[in-house]
Amino acid sequence: MNNNKKTKKRFSLIITLLIVIAGAIAYWQYSSNNSAPPVSKDTPTANTPNRSTAGSRRPPMPPVQVATSAQEDVPQFLTALGTVKAVNSVTVTSRVEGQLMALHFTEGQQVNQGDLLAEIDPRPFEVQLAQAKGQLAKDQATLANARLDLARYQKLAKTHLVSQQELDNQAALVKQSEASISIDKAAINNAQLQLTYSKITAPISGRVGLKQVDVGNYISGGSSTPIVVINQMDPVDVLFTLPEQDLSQVILARKNSPTLPVIALDRNNKIELAQGTLFSVDNQIDATTGTIKLKARFSSTRKYAISQSICQYSFICHYIRKSGSDPQCSITNGK
């Protein structure tokens, strides 16, 4: 009995030991397979020749260029906010009074100097012109008769049939008639001028704004109410201010370059709108703000700048100073 029990215990221990050993071997193999790096096509093995020594090449080195340092003009910039203004702005009003009969422009239209803008009722001025011409004809006839009488008096005065006083009176009457004709001619010119003023034309070339009066209204001569406003936008001016401490730099720059460049940028200082030149500098410094006003002039070839004329931009007034500079080289990144 005892021998059988001992045999069974030994057999159980052997089986348990074998199971433990088998589990340890399985765990070791599993760990070895997961930790080993994967074998790729490019990885050399015992049966694969070494390609790195056979045909591989290293990447080429990036090209390097040599340049010498040189002296050149380097722009120095002064930045300021500016506002676009019309070179000329004219408020169009009527010089004569009367009823507004017609408007010959479209709001926002580009007009040229001399273009017809509006018409005032011309009939009262036509009547005045006709009256002045009639008065001239009457006085011309009176003058002709007075001159004939003067010629007769001069003949009779030689025979003492008329007195010297009568002769002098007739000569004075001729001069009065001549003066009346001068007055009549002036009246005709005035009537013609009033008739001309009844047709209102553009005094300058530019862009018209919104109409300020409608057709049919009675307009007084020299009224404060305008018909329309014309802004000349070719070229355009830009007003901006700089601190007074920058004035000396601007003066020095203008001596070196009379046509000092000015660049107009958008509000983000990224898009160039136009290029112009510094036109004038104010003759006094604002004591309150410590700034001085400057004016730049731009050609209106850039329509975008004109369309944004009521906005503010960042304007760069730059001048040139000589200094040493390094050449700009292109560098290629290599691996």
Image: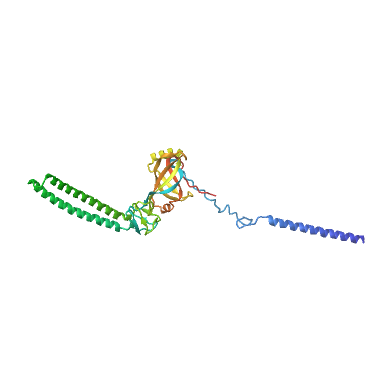
Percent position of residue 261, x then y: 40, 45
Percent position of residue 228, x then y: 38, 54
Q: Residue at x 13, y 51 (%)?
A: 149
Q: Residue at x 17, y 46 (%)?
A: 172
- So how many labels did they put on this image? 0
Residue lying furthest left? 159
**Closest to the observer, 309 or 314:** 309
Percent position of residue 160, x then y: 8, 46
Q: Is residue 68 visible?
A: no
Answer above or below: position of 120 versus 166: below
Q: Is residue 176 visible?
A: yes
Answer above or below: position of 19 versus 70: below
**Closest to the observer, 138 or 83:** 138
Q: Quadrant of the N terminus?
A: bottom right
Q: Residue at x 29, y 54 (%)?
A: 194
Percent position of residue 85, x then y: 41, 48
Residue 111 as seen in the image, left or right of residue 179: right
**Closest to the observer, 262 or 242:** 242
Residue 172 as seen in the image, left or right of residue 43: left
**Closest to the observer, 48 or 279:** 279
> What's the image's color scheme?
rainbow
